[in-house]
Image (spheres, rainbow, N blue to C red):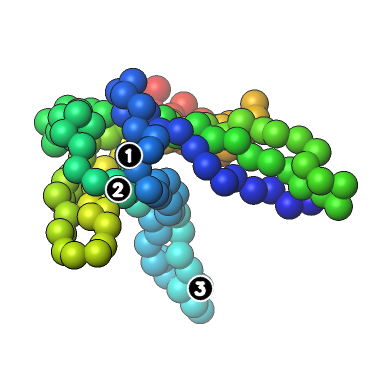
Amino acid sequence: MINSITNANCYNNGLRLAGKLSEVTLPDVKIKSEEAQPLGMYGTVEIPVGLEKMEAKFKFNAIYADAWREESPHKTSVIIVKSNMQKHTAAGVVENIPVTATFSGFFKEIPTGVIKPGSKLEPEHVMAISRYKLVVGSEVIYDIDVYNNIFIHCGKDILASFKSNQL
């Protein structure tokens, strides 16, 4: 079975950006770790200690004042990317599954692009992410909220005991 996503609609604070964006890069979930070499261990190991910062990138296909007006380093923006994933087999498409990525944060890079003859403008805006949720069908793959210590991966609350130990 092969899964494929070929297109998507993107919304910034309710404003539809599809057709204005040529590409969206979803946040990477990277585990922050530190080295540990306790007494009695011959080697060094890495242990997880949290999450690295997350960011998303939006590549526009031109200048759009209406969309850029919503971007600010002083307020949180909510971006929703909705797409359709097709499952393919030898018989063809056997299922269409909704895929939704929702994230919030602030825009930290808002370039206006480079203008030169015979080429697209394509400025790439970068957003610092504090909340990220990825849902495939009805399954929550990731639900991460840095400010509220939420880290759910495939339905499992990774921080459950961490949070209960602090009560």
SS state under label 3: loop
Q: Position of residue 90 (x, y in %)?
A: 86, 52
Q: Name which of mark 1 and mark 2 comes first in the sequence.
A: 1
Q: At 21% across and 37% down in the image, what residue appears?
A: 64
Measured Cα–Cα span from mark 1 to mark 2: 6 Å
Measured Cα–Cα span from mark 3 to mark 1: 55 Å
Residue 125 can be seen, yes or no: yes
Q: At 54% across and 35% down in the image, what residue appears?
A: 83
Q: Is residue 102 left or right of residue 61?
A: right
Q: Residue furthest front?
A: 118
Q: Residue furthest bottom?
A: 42
Disc number placed over residue 68 in the picture, else none: none
Task: Name the residue carrying label 2.
Answer: 61
Q: 45 or 144, which is in the foreground?
A: 144
Q: Are marks 1 and 2 in contact (CB under 8 Å)?
A: yes
Disc number placed over residue 20 in the picture, else none: 1
Is 35 located above or below residue 9 in the figure?
below
